[in-house]
Amino acid sequence: MGVLSRCLLNFAAIMKIVLIGAGNLATHIGGALQRAGHEITQVYSRTIEAAAELAEKLGASHTNCIEMIVRDADVYIFAVTDAALTEIIHEVCNGRENGLMLHTSGSTPMDCFRGMAKRYGVLYPLQTFSKCREIEFTNVPLFIEGCDAQVEREIDLLADGISHNHRHLDSADRRYLHLSAVWACNFVNHCYDIAAGILGQRDIPFDVLLPLIDETAAKVHRLPPNKAQTGPAVRFDENIIRSQAQLMSGDSRLKDLYERMSTSIHQRNKKQQS
Amino acid sequence: MGVLSRCLLNFAAIMKIVLIGAGNLATHIGGALQRAGHEITQVYSRTIEAAAELAEKLGASHTNCIEMIVRDADVYIFAVTDAALTEIIHEVCNGRENGLMLHTSGSTPMDCFRGMAKRYGVLYPLQTFSKCREIEFTNVPLFIEGCDAQVEREIDLLADGISHNHRHLDSADRRYLHLSAVWACNFVNHCYDIAAGILGQRDIPFDVLLPLIDETAAKVHRLPPNKAQTGPAVRFDENIIRSQAQLMSGDSRLKDLYERMSTSIHQRNKKQQS
């Protein structure tokens, strides 16, 4: 490692960081940054209790007033919903022009900062975060974008300290990445939830499904998902599909989803074979 | 362990088994039974190549002619599609009345054997099997049903040798279990496949999603799925939902699925909170 890299790393190692947001992501990224040696100086949230709770964990001050956000931090990390980001971005950036402004959103373009900040970018972590669940943050893939090459290097250094898995991705690609994550995580989890509901009707505990859930996830480490598919839909076993749809007739919305998912699997399979 | 159990176990340890079917499940269950010390004496499949391939692996004879299936086996295990099961069950059972007839289907009631066999039941493994992928069969949950208590004990003993995770479940509950498995495995895998397709459009490798996929599966070991949910749909972030649906407009079927899944997550969340 050259002298410059070391200097930059030292620079990275002492950043004063403000977290804008106190939800699941802010909690996890704040913890990871602190473990990397950075100082979380303040937590802002519009709900004072949330700000206080996370600030206490991190030994930081807290506020629910944008005016009171410190002006001399090195980095401001927005970890709020996209709607909140749009609402507060202008006020947060205003008067804090020396700070590096980063958002963590999959779907918001980096340019939301344009005209409001001088040094800005994106640090998008591709993971599902819940406050009550520990995450090994060093394994979380981080996707980075900076307003210029120098800023991008600064974000790289920051990312280096918290994850060994980071790469550059522009705003256009990041939207697709986020969309894919909704399928691979949120919709998958919804399928688990529907399965849990079906078992609950028959007093069968959800945990009977865990070996199947684990193997389904493990399989796609080795096989592309279209090669890993099994079950009645890919075989187009119409009798089972019809009889299972019938079992779901108590909830027409879910029955409809069942039928559309089955058709979609079958059609995709046909298309890939042709 | 009492003398009777040991005798029964010894009895179980030397069973002569015929596999009806040579697909993914037959391959895995045949291997597991052989490792447990049983003799796979013959493999039947309507396609002779499949029968020969699996038979060679297991050191068994093979046939594609039901007439030629041996008549002196202890157990006949049907591992075929439900449609094939219905077609061949009568002919296979006929003349083999001394054998224990077992099917492995989630959705077919045990009574499909009634009037055709004297000793019959179900051994339903809840897992996704692909030939090219090794499975630790001892962890596969097996669901057992027998035509009477004595037969149920025999199936228990057979199951004991191949998995440490088995329990009794009747045909009515098993249909719901199978349905839940379609959601938790096949539909989940379809979501992975759709995500892979989205990333493929932007030349982003699928493996960036693996830490997210693994965490989504790991989370439901600790949290019920409805508590584990994150993302735009559960927050009902309409802007992101609309903008992501827009990204999917190249495929109206998938766009439609995206919108229905999002609505379903949101509505389920509202219902659970009310």
Image: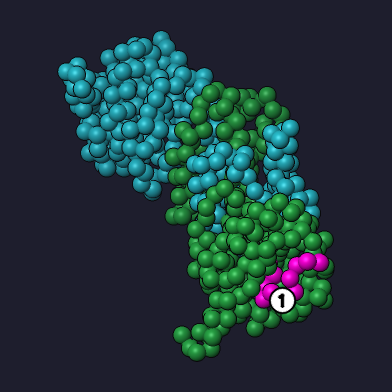
Chain colours: A green, B cyan
Vertical side of A128 occupied by B26: above or below? above
State the image coordinates of residue A169 (x, y, percent, origin top left): 63, 70
State the image coordinates of residue B167 (x, y, percent, origin top left): 39, 25
Crowding near pointer 1: few (<14 within 10 Å), some, many (20+)? Answer: some
Q: Which quadrant of the structure image shows residue A87?
A: bottom right
Vertical side of A240 occupied by B136: above or below? below
Vertical side of B61 occupied by A13: above or below? below
Residue at point 72%, 47% (across, down):
B235
* Between B68 and B10, the one nearer to me in the picture: B10
Q: Residue furthest bottom?
A: A3
Residue at point 32%, 22% (across, down):
B155
Q: In this figure, which residue is indicated by the disc labeled 1?
A: A72
Vertical side of A169 occupied by B198: above or below? above
The residue type indicated by label 1 comes to: Asp
The secondary element bearing badge 1 is classed as: loop
State the image coordinates of residue B52 (x, y, percent, origin top left): 30, 40
Tell me the magenta residue range.
Answer: A67-77
Residue at point 25%, 21% (across, down):
B74
